[in-house]
Amino acid sequence: MYYVCGVNFILSSTLNTSFVGILISCMQRDTELLLTVATFLESLPALSISNKPNIDSNKSKQSRLINTQLVSATQEFMSRVFEELDYRNEAKNCLEFANLYSRNGGNSTDVSVVVPKVYMNWCTENVLGECLNRHDHYHHQALIL
Amino acid sequence: MEWIEGTKLTDVQTNANTKYNANNLQGNDSVKENLALVKVAIDSTLSQLLVTGVLHADPHAGNLLKVRLEDGSITLGYLDFGLLSTIPSQVRDALVCSVVLQVFSRDIGKNF
């Protein structure tokens, strides 16, 4: 997950899009490496305590050392990470939530909460919007993530 | 994205327990306020899970804010919409039905 923090940090300081591109291609290569490791670990057979061959056919499914779907888990995890990296997705989610529960124009009658306003015109894959606080310049810088 | 000014719901613990904070009344007040907001958060999450099906899937203490509005009242604020789950209506109905079923069969005592 350090990549995610890295992208946020870099964006807040320089907004250098090409560098983000390099990071993402780096992550894609890391994903492939992780998948290789996962495939290898999944292929390991279980350690048999006795040297006798396991005749019981019911136990043949559990003859792996690690009984987890590591490859699927890795794929799921990495796709989640890539999804979180696209800020347009988060902006869309925020709008959807605000339409239901925002105290300014939410449709739900159950509860109303404060939801940050999203400026869709300012959102890209790497930028989640713009802070429009007139009073505080520090905040202005802090929210360009 | 708009800047939202607020404090964490968990901040109250540190405020109330500090010895430097001589004014205990203020601490108690904010405990009461924050507990009221926790109730709002529970209502909100139940509404998301069972009514609308648009669920904020990451409602931990860092993502929930206590926001003081211009008129002095306090409200709950939500942050971080990276994970927003959609609950299908069948699942919502099933959740309600299973609870209702247990209530009507007087079975809740066994589980709670």
Image (tube, coloured by chain):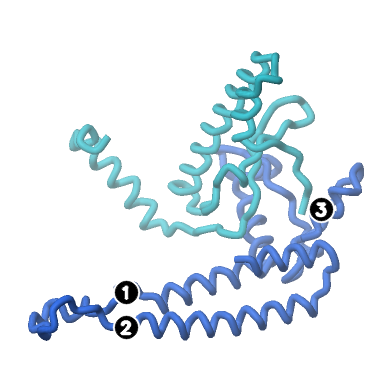
Question: Residue A32, which numbered label?
Answer: none
Give the residue type that dot 1 points to: Ile
Q: Earlier in the sequence, mark 1 or mark 2?
A: 2
Image position, residue B103 (x, y; %): 25, 36
Residue on which disc 2 sits: A44
In the picture, measured across the screen, residue A84 lies left or right of residue A138, that is: left
Image position, residue A40 (x, y; %): 40, 85
| Label 2 Cα neighbours within 10 Å, binned few <14 / some 14-19 / many ≥20 | few
Residue on which disc 1 sits: A66
Residue on which disc 3 sits: A142
Give the residue type that dot 3 points to: Ala
| Label 1 Cα neighbours within 10 Å, binned few <14 / some 14-19 / many ≥20 | some
Residue found at x 54% / y 33% = B38
Report the chain holding disc 2: A
SS under mark 2: loop
Figure chain in blue: A
SS under mark 3: helix
Whether labels 2 and 3 belong to a single chain: the reply is yes
